[in-house]
Image: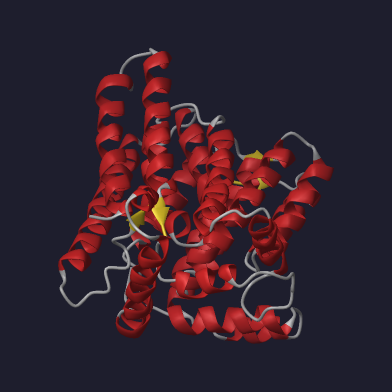
């Protein structure tokens, strides 16, 4: 069993309790209590991991050797290096640094989900099913996503100077953060432009059209605009993740329909939530075939999209069967995701990089021994399982 399995199973059980015990009543006290319990358990599970995942082969040696500040690095962004250097200067361990990042992320999710009116536990389940990669593995991007969510919340409150500060931090912490930082600035600049219901149908048509038409030249077009390090990263992500059909195409299609029905007016203006929803759907449509690249971008808009669709659905004429089909598909994907990890854990030739250590082991084990075991698992993953994971269909 691994941390991702535990999280999904726990949230799945609590989601069922939420629907059975709380959804039919108006007792918001019990609903909020159940959500707080689920949030706290999820936070603890994701926080106690120690030397977890395959990227520690880069992160741990770099953090251990970070005695002087040098912002020039071919892989790590300046913001990430500076943050890690500050932690290391304060004698904070590698686990302590990951814990701080996790606190930032969960604080941003807690503040964002304050705008969610109902089914918060189920929203957490969706978040971990579709974004477990960010929550458990991507230290750099997790902090960048946290800053972006803070920026979005500032945009809602029209605190634009704070928004700009958080967007600068987002871009400095991870290269992918610049993409949605630019989109959020465009949304603020053109928020008086009318958003129509048909825009979401257009996004769906673009999605199905680009499934048939390759967009390999997109990265070439960007080469003349963006710095070489960024375009090199885009080329790399495109090359690793090209796939004709993803199994979650049905979810993306239903999402487009849900967004279409959620607009209960003919047009919308000055609504940042719906602008972000449309931009998210267009991002899915354009980069659908490039799973790994889309996975990077998806982390920025997924929590916001969850809140918007949940709230909009309660105040619109969305057909009930769309809810039912979407819920069934989400449950199937959550079970499928869990079973995939269980199958890897039971494979004697697998690296078992997902079967991680917990911080409490430091009470009775040596840190160096734990680190060596985790790094050994990570090396096996890169040597045996990486290509299969990247080129496999999700």
Task: Tell me which corner region of the image, top left, top right, bottom left or bottom right, holds residue 75.
Answer: bottom right
Q: Residue at x 40, y 53 (%)?
A: 49
Q: Residue at x 54, y 69 (%)?
A: 286
Q: Residue at x 52, y 54 (%)?
A: 98
Residue 211 visible within the image: yes
Which is nearer the eye, 218 or 8? 8
Horizontal arrangement in the rendering, residue 86 relative to residue 364 (left or right)? right
Q: How many marks?
A: 0
**Rendered view: 268 above or below 172:** above
Q: Position of residue 243 (x, y in %)?
A: 39, 78
Q: Residue at x 40, y 48 (%)?
A: 48
Horizontal arrangement in the rendering, residue 280 relative to residue 86 (left or right)? left
Which is nearer the eye, 277 or 117? 117
Q: Position of residue 202 (x, y in %)?
A: 54, 59
Q: Position of residue 79 (x, y in %)?
A: 71, 63
**Rendered view: 334 above or below 219:** above
**Rendered view: 347 above or below 255:** below
Q: How is the image coloured?
A: secondary structure
Horizontal arrangement in the rendering, residue 377 relative to residue 187 (left or right)? left
Residue 197 visible within the image: no
Identify the image quadrant of the N terminus: bottom left
Which is nearer the eye, 366 or 314? 366
Task: Tell me which corner region of the image, top left, top right, bottom left or bottom right, holds residue 12.
Answer: top left
Q: Position of residue 390 (x, y in %)?
A: 38, 77
Identify the image quadrant of the C terminus: bottom left
């Amino acid at each position: 069993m691994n941390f991702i399995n535990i999280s999904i199973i726990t949230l799945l059980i609590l989601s069922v309790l939420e629907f059975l015990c709380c959804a039919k009543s108006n007792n918001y006290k019990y609903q909020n209590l159940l959500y707080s319990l689920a949030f706290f358990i999820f936070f603890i599970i994701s926080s106690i991991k120690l030397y977890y995942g395959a990227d520690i082969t880069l992160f741990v040696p770099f953090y251990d050797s970070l005695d002087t500040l040098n912002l020039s690095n071919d892989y790590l962004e300046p913001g990430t290096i500076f943050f890690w250097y500050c932690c290391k200067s304060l004698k904070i361990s590698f686990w302590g640094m990951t814990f701080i990042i996790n606190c930032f992320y969960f604080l941003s999710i807690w503040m964002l989900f304050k705008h969610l009116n109902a089914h918060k536990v189920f929203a957490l389940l969706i978040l971990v099913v579709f974004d477990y990669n960010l929550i458990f593995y991507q230290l750099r991007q997790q902090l960048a996503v946290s800053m972006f969510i803070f920026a979005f919340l500032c945009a809602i409150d029209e605190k634009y100077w704070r928004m700009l500060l958080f967007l600068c931090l987002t871009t400095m912490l991870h290269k992918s953060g610049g993409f949605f930082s630019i989109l959020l600035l465009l949304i603020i600049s053109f928020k008086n432009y009318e958003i129509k219901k048909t825009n979401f149908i257009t996004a769906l048509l673009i999605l199905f059209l680009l499934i048939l038409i390759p967009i390999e030249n997109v990265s070439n077009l960007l080469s003349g605009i963006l710095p070489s390090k960024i375009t090199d990263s885009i080329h790399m992500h495109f090359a690793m993740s090209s796939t004709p059909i993803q199994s979650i195409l049905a979810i993306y299609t239903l999402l487009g329909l849900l967004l279409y029905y959620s607009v209960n007016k003919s047009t919308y203006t000055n609504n940042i939530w719906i602008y972000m929803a449309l931009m998210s759907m267009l991002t899915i449509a354009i980069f659908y075939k490039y799973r790994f690249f889309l996975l990077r971008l998806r982390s920025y808009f997924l929590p916001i999209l969850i809140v918007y669709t949940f709230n909009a659905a309660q105040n619109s004429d969305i057909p009930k069967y769309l809810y039912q089909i979407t819920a069934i598909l989400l449950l199937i994907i959550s079970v499928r995701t869990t079973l995939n990890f269980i199958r890897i854990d039971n494979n004697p030739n697998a690296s078992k990089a997902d079967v991680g250590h917990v911080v409490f082991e430091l009470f009775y084990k040596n840190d160096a021994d734990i680190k060596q075991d985790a790094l050994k698992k990570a090396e096996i993953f890169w040597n045996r399982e990486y290509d299969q994971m990247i080129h496999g269909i999700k």
